Image: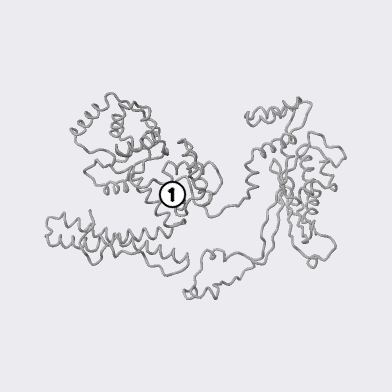
């Protein structure tokens, strides 16, 4: 049904964007949501009126005057109201998007044009393009099946004539299938025409157009091929229709999305998206046989925002609001082939020991593992030339620290921190008088507490070691740098002991070298006894008897790269680690 063109009291030009008077993001969002709900209510009113109009028109007893009155109401009120609803929805969507609003609008416009190309069948004379789009909107096609609107609605005689004409044209012309199975891309069709004899090239062009293997007219195809023959740049991109070609076509967006998916765990910002697009544009020019000297290193901000929004709409990607920031050094270390190779060398040199003969139980366990899991043991055995056995999982431990913020009280007001209410007069004076809230909790008067964790390969957990740092000489009035308190029961079994084992709480002063001293204490009083208890419980060996630790009970302990831990491990004062 078309729009009313007659002047009316509420014309389409009167539909304006909703008026938002607040100046905070949260209040604006609430008002935009309110406008959306209001638009949905008016849309329901319009639906009710349309149903009444249909009932009146289809009722044989209805008078012409009542039908005319309904039609006048339809032109005067319903059409302008729906026009205003459409503008309101578009305006609210622009402001509620997490990305730059107008970039999202442009991206949606582009995707709408792509959808129309796929859905609308221009040869369908029964349904207008608008009706075809509406039909697809309420009954979308299932994945993998074509849309109902693509089916031709022609009489059998017209179809047979078209087929007979096509048979005459394509009698001696067999075209190869398109690479994507649908249409030739620009560079693809140019390379195909280049191989055709010049005398037959016109017929081949006609056949390509007849089979709808390109998205343009014959003249456009001829100009494109002439441009290719003259040595000008022709990119391997999709057909975009009239107007300037997009910087990145739909297949290019899919290609960039695949690259982002391949980099699992990484979040991409504006600079990263810019780099991916620039890299894609350079690749396209290299594929076409040109050097990418015309590709700028920085895209215009408006263009970048459009593609950020278009990428955000891809079903494979999601928007995140929090990420863990990594330095380039850490990222390189985590993704470096050299670093991975070095880690394998360290494991190969430290996690396998020479034995006179492999234990039958260990040998059976190794044979039951997949080849890929057993590969490193086989390589070490081949390199050494003697039987090698892996170190027992109970003797492989890892130490790491986590930091918690501890304070007295509760965070009962934390749920209210997502938003607060303030008078609009407060907003007008916020430049001279800040907007504040009263904090009645103790969450701003706490300590940062470190928890040192050590686990072994069998799930054993060393005794708890808690460190409260940052005290002064006034807080801890003694000559040393730290105070260690042993607390029975602060252990939760320790993974191998009982709930009566001892846990540790360490209070340290804010002085140089205290971290190294703390780790030395941890290694001597927590880590080494933990390793000894594992030997005693799992292997029946007690080093307290004075016996030397055999090679097959060698222990390996991992810790992170904190320099205080490295210095503590290398200290001559903890020679007990070498014995263990």
Question: Nearest the camera: 519 or 245?
Answer: 245
- The residue pinned by badge 1 equals 310
For numbered disc 1, what is the local secondary structure? Answer: helix
Q: Position of residue 54 (x, y in %)?
A: 20, 55
Work out whether 441 lies above or below 93: below
Question: Nearest the camera: 420 or 9?
Answer: 9
Q: The C terminus appears in which quarter of the rendering?
A: top right
User: Position of 345 compared to 301: left or right?
Assistant: right
Q: Position of residue 380 (x, y in %)?
A: 72, 29
User: Position of 12 compared to 466: left or right?
Assistant: left
The answer to which quarter of the image holds residue 456 is: top right
Work out whether 50 lies above or below 257: below
Q: Position of residue 152 (x, y in %)?
A: 25, 38
Question: Residue at 69% across / 40% down in the picture?
Answer: 458
Residue projecting furthest to the right: 546
Work out whether 295 lies above or below 181: below
Question: Nearest the camera: 5 or 515?
Answer: 5
The answer to which quarter of the image holds residue 151 is: top left
Question: Residue at 43% across / 64% down in the picture?
Answer: 30
């Amino acid at each position: 049904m078309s729009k009313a063109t007659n002047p009316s009291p509420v014309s389409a030009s009167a539909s304006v964007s909703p008026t938002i008077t607040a100046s905070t993001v949260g209040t604006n969002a609430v008002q935009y949501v309110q406008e959306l709900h209001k638009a949905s209510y008016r849309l329901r009113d319009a639906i009710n009126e349309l149903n009444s109009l249909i009932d009146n028109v289809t009722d044989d007893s209805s008078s012409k005057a009542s039908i005319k009155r309904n039609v006048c109401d339809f032109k005067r009120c319903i059409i302008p109201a729906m026009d205003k609803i459409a503008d309101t929805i578009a305006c609210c969507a622009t402001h509620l998007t997490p990305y730059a609003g107008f970039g999202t609008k442009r991206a949606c416009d582009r995707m709408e044009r792509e959808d129309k190309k796929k859905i609308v069948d221009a040869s369908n004379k029964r349904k207008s393009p608008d009706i075809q789009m509406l039909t697809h909107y309420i009954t979308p096609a299932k994945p993998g099946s074509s849309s109902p609107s693509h089916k031709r609605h022609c009489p059998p005689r017209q179809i047979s004539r078209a087929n007979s004409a096509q048979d005459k044209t394509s009698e001696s012309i067999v075209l190869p299938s398109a690479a994507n199975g649908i249409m030739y891309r620009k560079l693809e069709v140019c390379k195909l025409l280049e191989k055709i004899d010049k005398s037959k090239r016109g017929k081949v062009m006609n056949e390509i157009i007849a089979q709808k293997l390109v998205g343009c007219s014959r003249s456009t195809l001829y100009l494109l091929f002439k441009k290719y023959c003259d040595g000008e740049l022709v990119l391997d991109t999709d057909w975009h229709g009239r107007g300037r070609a997009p910087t990145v076509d739909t297949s290019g967006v899919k290609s960039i999305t695949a690259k982002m998916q391949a980099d699992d765990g990484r979040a991409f910002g504006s600079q990263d998206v810019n780099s991916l697009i620039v890299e894609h544009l350079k690749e396209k020019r290299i594929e076409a046989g040109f050097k990418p000297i015309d590709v700028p290193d920085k895209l215009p901000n408006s263009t970048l925002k459009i593609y950020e929004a278009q990428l955000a709409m891809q079903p494979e990607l999601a928007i995140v609001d929090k990420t863990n920031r990594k330095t380039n050094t850490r990222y390189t270390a985590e993704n470096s082939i050299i670093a991975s190779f070095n880690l394998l060398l360290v494991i190969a040199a430290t996690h396998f020991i020479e034995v006179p003969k492999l234990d039958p139980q260990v040998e059976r366990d190794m044979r039951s593992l997949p080849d890929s899991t057993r590969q490193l043991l086989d390589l070490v055995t081949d390199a050494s030339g003697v039987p090698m056995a892996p170190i027992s999982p109970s003797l492989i431990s890892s130490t790491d620290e986590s930091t918690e913020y501890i304070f007295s009280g509760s965070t009962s007001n934390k749920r209210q921190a997502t938003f607060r209410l303030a008078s609009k007069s407060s907003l007008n004076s916020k430049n001279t008088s800040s907007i504040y809230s009263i904090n009645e909790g103790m969450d701003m008067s706490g300590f940062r507490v470190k928890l040192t964790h050590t686990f072994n390969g069998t799930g054993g957990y060393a005794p708890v070691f808690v460190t409260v740092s940052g005290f002064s000489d006034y807080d801890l009035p003694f000559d040393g740098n730290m105070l260690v308190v042993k607390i029975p029961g602060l252990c939760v079994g320790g993974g191998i002991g009982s709930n009566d084992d001892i846990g540790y709480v360490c209070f340290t002063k804010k002085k140089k070298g205290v971290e190294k001293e703390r780790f030395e204490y941890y290694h001597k009083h927590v880590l080494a006894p933990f390793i000894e208890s594992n030997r005693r419980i799992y292997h029946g060996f007690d080093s307290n008897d004075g016996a030397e630790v055999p090679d097959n009970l060698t222990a390996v302990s991992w810790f992170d790269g904190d320099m205080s831990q490295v210095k503590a491990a290398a200290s001559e004062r903890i020679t007990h680690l070498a014995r263990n």
